[in-house]
Image (tube, rainbow, N blue to C red):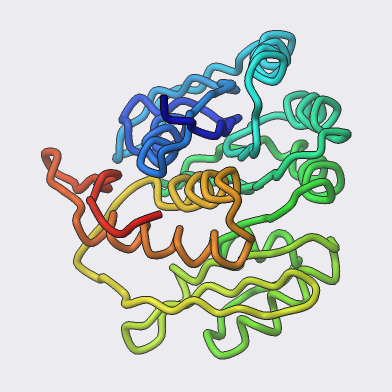
Amino acid sequence: MNYYPTALTIAGSDSGGGAGIQADLKAFSFHFVHGTSAITCITAQNPDGVSGILEIPIDLVEKQIQAVLDFFPVSSIKTGMLFSLSIINKVVETLKDKKLNLVVDPVMVATSGAKLLKNDAISAMLENLIPIASLVTPNKDEGEILLGKPIQDFDKMEDVTVEIYAKYKVPILLKGGHIPKENKLKDVLYDGHKISTFHSEYLPNVSTHGTGCTYSASIAALLAKGHNLENSVRLAKKYLHEAIQQSYSVGRVSSLNHSPGIGDF
């Protein structure tokens, strides 16, 4: 019988199937990692926007997490949409003493522009959740909130990543999907000792949903399999690029192909 390591995603549900819990579980499965979940919110959404959000009662969020941790040998956890102050603080309370890889995707705004984090929850994320993370994966907009100032220069991403690390003292992966230069993209990882830069080609004619969720879930899955942080990011970026490149049509939009059939992970 084959053995699969286990990862847990704590995030919201996307009824459109392209992001959130749905994307996370697809990414886990691609990497041959058993996916478990704790749903924080139910959203009514599609690529045009979010038309409704229902927050799961805090005690049920806690019970979902605990039910998974009590039974499964969880190796890594990723967080996505946490939405509220109470959910963030409960996640921190539940996980702070656990010796597990914790990848925090600081989800604040959907691709469509809908807010996925209440205003009073931002400080709890910055002050309570991020400091217990093994890795934080902000995009440009989230990085600006973490840093407190604009991020605009492709050539200064390394400096900015180090600056964010200095503020929170946890490894930072600054994603450059919204900071292209000459059809090139880069993500920058700084773990407090080493800067690692990961380059890829900008794909201007592909518009997809759930890239951040997929990327962070893939990193968590690879950490669960025993890869170190740098290699997890490198392999996850390769996977995400292929998932975007091989995206498929679903009506008026494209969807990430979470099973592109690439590589050996």
In the visual, does 94 lie left or right of 107?
right
- Image quadrant in which you'd find residue 61: top right
* 148 lies above or below 181: above
Where in the figure is residue 185, as x and y percent of width and height? 41, 77
**Residue at 73% in and 63% down:** 171
* 3 lies above or below 39: below
Where in the figure is residue 9, as x and y percent of width and height? 57, 32
* 153 lies above or below 127: below
- Image quadrant in which you'd find residue 137: bottom right
Say which of 199 and 142 sits in front. 199
Q: Can you name the residue that lies furthest to the front here? A: 1
Q: Count how many numbered circles sit on residues in the image.
A: 0
Where in the figure is residue 220, as x and y percent of width and height? 57, 46
* 166 lies above or below 49: below
Say which of 143 and 238 sits in front. 238
The quarter of the rendered structure image containing the C terminus is bottom left
Say which of 16 and 114 sits in front. 16
**Residue at 49% in and 76% down:** 198
The quarter of the rendered structure image containing the N terminus is top left
- Image quadrant in which you'd find residue 241: bottom left
Say which of 238 and 161 sits in front. 238
In the visual, does 89 lie left or right of 83?
right
**Residue at 62% in and 75% down:** 151
**Residue at 52% in and 85% down:** 154
Where in the figure is residue 251, as x and y percent of width and height? 11, 39
